């Protein structure tokens, strides 16, 4: 039988890529999103779409009344580390409140499985070693704290109500669906790779580098960039695993760490354009280094990151940005020179 999956935040960057993959695999997908940061055009055409604010309990119950969902994937959240330092109460209230609303409705309506988008930001920075699921959870910013709270809510809900849960801690989601029609479009953009590519496009004069005095190889922050298609694949594997198990938690990253300077250099190579930089002070709440150990996901669910080498991440993102310079809703241009084949 066809499984029904409710994808909250399915108009956002990661949620839309997962929704597309689910549709391609034959799941029946309903996307619910308030479009506060997502885009209607990112939602796959075969998915049902509901425009709703998940902070309103009444609206959520209406969504659940329409269809019996086998699983919920909960992406809808505020997700910016930097912004969370200036709006800590909004981050906790909206992220934890929304999760509670959707989870309660899922339990009330007999949904079997629930997958939460969590984050590497629940962990402390580790300079020498990568981060597996046994690492101490210790968020360094309100965003990570809100997701830690969400994880705890899920833990108790599974114990008390039996709903099967999984948390996926994404490291830095990046890249785009090959083909150039689906990608990352935040307004305003704050993420490193899209910003660097906007500089390459001539849409920004330079990229600010936030801090060069971290205890890392070149003094700039190190992150683990994981391709959004590999994240999507992790979701599908987790969805299937939840048919026979529960209380799952996985760290999802490529296992390779790159500094801000290395990202800039790699983007210069891929685009063939100069990317000027300006040194700035540290951004509050940024850990020095976050690199995943995803051995558990590989061992238990057979996951392999197939698209997460840095060249593929930046090349697919560059195709998206080149074909849609203004993001969703802007004209579709030809493939950029040197971008290689669309797939
Ligand atoms: N950076 C700059 N200049 C910029 C933008 C970013 O130097 O103009 C640096 C940041 O300081 C950071 C790195 O580039 O060291 C990556 O920054 P992003 O803003 O792209 O991403 P974050 O690591 O802050 O956060 C992202 C997601 C979170 C997620 C986290 C997991 O936004 O939702 O990855 O590591 F939790």
Image: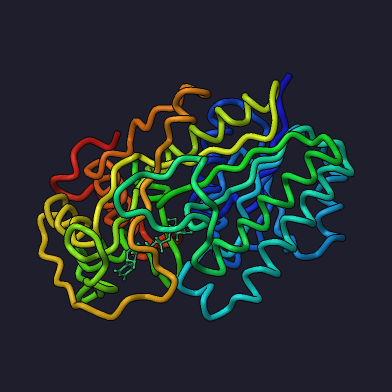
The residue that appears at 74% across and 34% down in the rendered structure is 164
Q: Quadrant of the C terminus?
A: top left
Residue at x 74%, y 52% (from the top left corner): 153
Can the viewer see residue 319 in this picture? no
Asked if one can make out residue 95 in the rendered structure from this viewpoint, the answer is: yes
Horizontal side, residue 51 vs residue 57: left or right:
left
Q: Position of residue 105 (x, y in %)?
A: 84, 49
Relative height, residue 124 to residue 112 (above, below): below
For the residue pair 145 and 127, the one nearer the viewer reads as: 127
Q: For the N terminus, which image quadrant?
A: top right
Q: Nearer the viewer, residue 91 or 247?
A: 247
Residue 297 located left or right of residue 260: right
Q: Quadrant of residue 211?
A: bottom left
Quadrant containing ligand 1:
bottom left
Task: Please say which color scheme the image uses.
Answer: rainbow
Q: How many marks?
A: 0
In the rendering, at what x and y percent does residue 47 appear?
63, 41
Could you tell whether 270 is left or right of 53 in the image? Answer: left
Report x, y in % for residue 103: 78, 49
With respect to residue 35, does 278 lie above or below? below
Relative to 108, residue 239 above or below:
above
Name the residue rendered at 23%, 60% in the picture.
216
Q: For the point 67% across and 58% down, which residue is it? A: 149
- Relative placement, left or right, of 179 versus 23 is left
Residue 24: x and y, percent?
Answer: 53, 30
């Amino acid at each position: 039988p066809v499984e029904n999956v409710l994808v909250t935040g399915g108009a956002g960057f990661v949620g839309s890529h997962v929704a597309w993959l689910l549709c391609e695999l034959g799941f029946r997908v309903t996307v619910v999103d308030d479009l506060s940061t997502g885009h209607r055009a990112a939602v796959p055409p075969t998915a049902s779409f509901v425009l709703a604010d998940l902070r309103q309990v009444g609206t959520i119950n209406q969504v659940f009344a329409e269809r019996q969902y086998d699983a919920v994937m909960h992406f809808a959240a505020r997700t910016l580390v930097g912004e969370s330092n200036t709006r800590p109460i909004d981050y906790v209230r909206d992220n934890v409140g929304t999760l509670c609303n959707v989870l309660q409705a899922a339990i009330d309506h007999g949904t079997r499985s629930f997958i939460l988008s969590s984050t590497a930001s629940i962990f402390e920075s580790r300079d020498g070693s990568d981060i597996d699921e046994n690492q101490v959870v210790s968020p360094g910013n309100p965003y990570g704290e809100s997701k830690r709270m969400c994880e705890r809510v899920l833990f108790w809900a599974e114990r008390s109500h039996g709903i099967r849960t999984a948390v996926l801690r994404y490291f830095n989601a990046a890249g785009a669906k090959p083909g150039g029609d689906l990608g990352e479009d935040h307004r305003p953009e704050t993420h490193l790779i899209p910003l660097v590519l906007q500089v390459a496009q001539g849409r920004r004069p330079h990229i600010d580098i936030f801090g060069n005095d971290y205890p890392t190889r070149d003094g700039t922050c190190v992150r683990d960039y994981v391709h959004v298609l590999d994240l999507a694949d992790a979701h599908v594997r987790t969805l299937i695993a939840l048919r026979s198990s529960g209380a799952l938690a996985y760290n999802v990253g490529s296992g390779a760490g790159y500094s801000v300077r290395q990202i800039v250099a790699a983007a210069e190579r891929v685009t063939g354009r100069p990317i000027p930089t300006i040194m700035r002070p540290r951004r509050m709440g940024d850990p020095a280094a976050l690199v995943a150990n995803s051995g558990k996901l590989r061992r238990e669910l057979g996951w392999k990151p197939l698209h997460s080498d840095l060249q593929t991440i930046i090349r697919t993102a560059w195709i998206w940005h080149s074909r849609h310079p203004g993001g969703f809703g802007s004209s579709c241009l030809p493939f950029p020179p040197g971008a290689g084949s669309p797939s």
